[in-house]
Image (cartoon, rainbow, N blue to C red):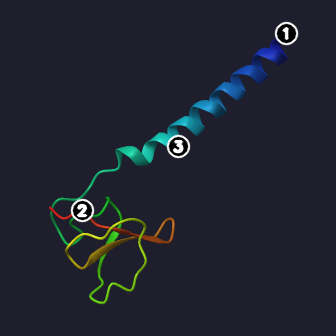
């Protein structure tokens, strides 16, 4: 009986961790000042004058994109 409870608690803990990891990106903080304005905290802003860097979705009017080093991808910044 104790082994079943232990397995159940382990599975429940794993599900809680997976849920937290899937929800966390929705609460990322956008930087509103400093050199990386318009990017999520921890990401870098890059100037793309020729707009050759592919991003998902529409591009804003400025020529900046953000680089997410953790996932090795670019995305469009949010101009403030």
When asked about the image quadrant of residue 14, the answer is: top right
The disc, 2 or 1, on the residue closer to the chain's N-terminal end is: 1
Task: In the rendered view, tell whether residue 27 sits above or below residue 72.
Answer: above
When asked about the image quadrant of residue 32, the answer is: bottom left
Residue 66 at x, y percent in the picture: 34, 71
- Residue position for label 1: 1
- Real-space CA distance between mark 2 and mark 1, rounded to the nearest whole angstrom: 54 Å
Pointer 3 and pointer 1: residues touching (CB < 8 Å)? Answer: no
Disc 3: CA contacts within 10 A as few (<14), some (14-19) or many (>=20): few
Residue 13 at x, y percent in the picture: 63, 29
Residue 77 at x, y percent in the picture: 28, 66
Mark 1 falls on what kind of element?
Answer: loop
When asked about the image quadrant of residue 4, the answer is: top right
Mark 2 falls on what kind of element?
Answer: loop
**In this view, which residue lies farthest toward the top?**
1
Quadrant showing the C terminus? bottom left
Residue 26 at x, y percent in the picture: 39, 45
> At 35% across and 50% down in the image, what residue appears?
28
For marks 2 and 1, give the one nearer the viewer: 2
> At 44% across and 44% down in the image, what residue appears?
24
- Residue position for label 2: 78
Mark 3 falls on what kind of element?
Answer: helix
């Amino acid at each position: 009986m104790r082994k079943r409870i232990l397995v159940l608690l382990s599975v429940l803990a794993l599900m809680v961790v997976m849920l937290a990891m899937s929800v966390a990106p929705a609460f990322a903080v956008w930087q509103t000042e400093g050199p990386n304005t318009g990017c999520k905290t921890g990401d870098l802003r890059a100037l793309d004058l020729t707009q050759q860097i592919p991003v998902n979705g529409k591009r804003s009017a400025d020529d900046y994109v953000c680089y997410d080093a953790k996932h090795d991808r670019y995305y469009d910044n949010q101009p403030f």
